[in-house]
Image (cartoon, grey):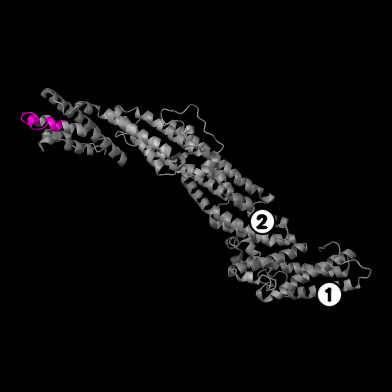
Amino acid sequence: MRTIFSKSPYPPTRHHTSTESLIEENIEAAELSITKWDSLYGDDHVSYCNIASLFSENNRDEAKQYLSSIKGLQKAMRYLASLESTSDKLVRAQTLMQTAMKRLEREFYQILKSNGNYLDPESVSNHSSSRLSVSRSSFSDSEEGGSENDSIPEVERGSSAVIADLRAIAEAMISAGYAKECFKIYRTIRKSIVDEALYNLGVERNLGFQQIQKMEWEILEVKIKHWLNAVKGAVKTVFYGERLLCDQVFAISSSIRESCFTDVSKEGALALFGFPENVAKCKKTPEKMFRILDLYEAVSDLWPEIESIFSFESTSTVRSTAVNSLIRLSDAVRTMLTDFEMAIQKHSSKTTVPSGGIHPLTRYVMNYISFLADYSGVLSDIIADWPLQISSPLPESYFGSPDKEESISSPISVRLAWLILVMLCKLDGKAEMYKDVALSYLFLANNLQYVVNKVRQSNLKLLLGDNWVTKHEQKVRKYAANYERMGWSKVFAALPENPTAEIPVDQVIEHFRNFNSAFEEAYKKQTSWVVTDPKLRDEIKLSLARRIGPIYKEFFDKYGGVQLMKEMWAETLVRYTPDDLGNYCSDLFFGSGSSGSISSSSSQGGGYSR
C-alpha cells in the first residue's frame, strides 16, 4: 500500500477529539462516494472503455464531490500517518485511496481514448492556451467565467472542458502519489496519436542515411517534396498541439509535463529533423541546390517554433538535430556554389553558336543564378560569414570588381555578381573562337543582352541594382557598335565622304561597284546571323539604316538617275534603290540564311529595274 507522509494539516492541540471526528467524517464521506462508483465496475478486468463515466455531463456534481472526497481522504491519511502509521483507520483510508485511484485511472484512459475529436493535434493546436484556460475547471460554478465561456465556439468549449477534466484527474492522481500510473496511460495513448498524425502527414520514420544515399535523385526529390509538405503541419499542428495539451493537463507538475511531452514527441521529432541532415550529407550536385535551399528555408522559418516547443532540457537533442540540419544544409549549399563556379570556369566546350546567338552556357548559368536570387534571404544567412575569396583581381576593364560597385554591397549580391562575371569572362574566351570578328561581337552583344534581360526580369534586379543594369546595357551597345564597325566597314568605305560632290564618272562607277560588292558580301554572310532580343535587333537595324541610308540616297539621287540610265550598263551597275537597302536590312538577324535572295534579284537587274 502507498502512504503519504507529511506534517499534519491540522494544528496540534492537547485534545484531538474534534480533529479525529473530522477525520472520521472525511473517511466516511470518501468511502460513500468511492464505493458507490466502484460498484459500477463489475470485476477488475472490465475494459477501461466499458465503464459508466463519472465525468459525463449527467454526473458533474458527483464528479466534483468525488474529487473533493479524495482531497479530504488525503488530509485524513496525512494526519493519521503522523500519529500512527499502522492504525486501522489509515489502512482503511489507504484501501479507499487505491480504489479511487483505480477509478481515476480508468476515467483518465476513457477520456483520452474517447475524445479524439477534441484532443487530436489539429484541434488542440487551434486553441490558444489562454482560451483553454478560460474554463479553469469544468467543475467551476456557472457564475465563474460564464460570460467568457459564452463567447467561445462550442468546439473550443468542448475541448476546454475535456482538458479541464484531464487536468483535474491528473492533479488528483499526482497529489495522491499516483503520477507514474497517470503518466503511463497518457504516454501510451498520446504517443500513438502523435505517431499516427505524423504518418498521415507523410513523415517517414525509418529513413536513414544509408537508404537516402542509395536513392536515385528523382526518387529522393519526391521524398523531399513530401517532407516539405509535412514539416510545417508537424511542427505547428502536431508538436505544438501536443506541447499545449501536456502543459494544460499536467500544469501541476513541470517535471511530469516535460517527461510526458518528451516521451510522446521526441522520437517523431528526431525522425523529422534528421531527414534534411541526412539529405545534406549525400553527394552534392548542382541540380540538388534548390531542394537543399528549400529544406534549409523550411527548418529556418520554423526554428522559433522548434525552439519554443522543444524548450525542455530533455528535448535538447531535437533542437540540436534541427540546428545540425541547418549547419549541414548550409555547408552543402556552400559546396555546391563553389562547385558551380568551378564548373563554369572549367567549361571546355569548343563549339560556337554559328548564328552568334545565345550560348547554352549563358542560358543555363543565368537560369540557375536567377533561381538563386529567389532564395536571397536564405542565401544571405548561409553566406553571411563566408566572404568571397578571389585569387586574382577581377578584370576592371571588363566589368569592374563587384566589391567596388557602389550598388553592390551585400554578400549575396557580391556572390551572384561574381558568378555572372565568371560566366561572362568565359563567354569572352568563346567569342575569340569566331573567325569573323564582327560575328564575335554580335555573339557578345546577344549573350550580354540575355544576361541583362534575365537580371531585369528576376529578383537579381533588386540584388544587383539599377547601376549594374545600366553599366551592362552600355556594354551591350558597345558590342553592337563594334559589330557594326567591323561587319559593315567595307560598305561604309564604299560610299563617298561627300555624296553630293561633283566627281568624275569613273569614280562614280567605282563607288557603285565597290558598294554593290561590299553590301552583297556583308548581306549574304549575315543572313544566317541572329539577334535574339527584338529591341536590340531593331536598334542595330536602325543604326545601320541611319549610317548607310542617307548617304546612299544622296549619292543615288545624284548619280543613279537619268545620267547613268543613258549608259548601256546602268542596270547592272546601280543594283539597289534606297528602299531596296531598307528591305534587305529588315531581313537581317533572324538567322534564316535564305531570306532576301540577293543573287536572284541582282540577276534580274536589281532593285532599280523593279
Residue 193: quadrant of the picture: bottom right
Mark found first going from the N terminus, 2 or 1:
1
Circle count? 2
Left or right: 90, with 414 as reference point: right
Q: Residues within 10 Å of mark 1 (few under 14, many from 20)?
A: some
Question: Height in image: 234 above or below 139?
Answer: above
Residue 113: x, y in percent? 63, 66
Check the image and name the residue furthest to the right: 14
Q: Secondary structure at mark 1?
A: helix
Q: Position of residue 227 (x, y in %)?
A: 53, 51
Relative horizontal placement of residue 87, taking residue 326 as reference (left or right): right
Cα distance, mark 2 to mark 1?
39 Å
Q: Is residue 182 visible?
A: yes
Front position in the image: 480 or 22: 480
The residue range painted magenta reads: 555-570
Residue 261 - label: 2
Up the image or down, 321 lies above or below 107; here it is above
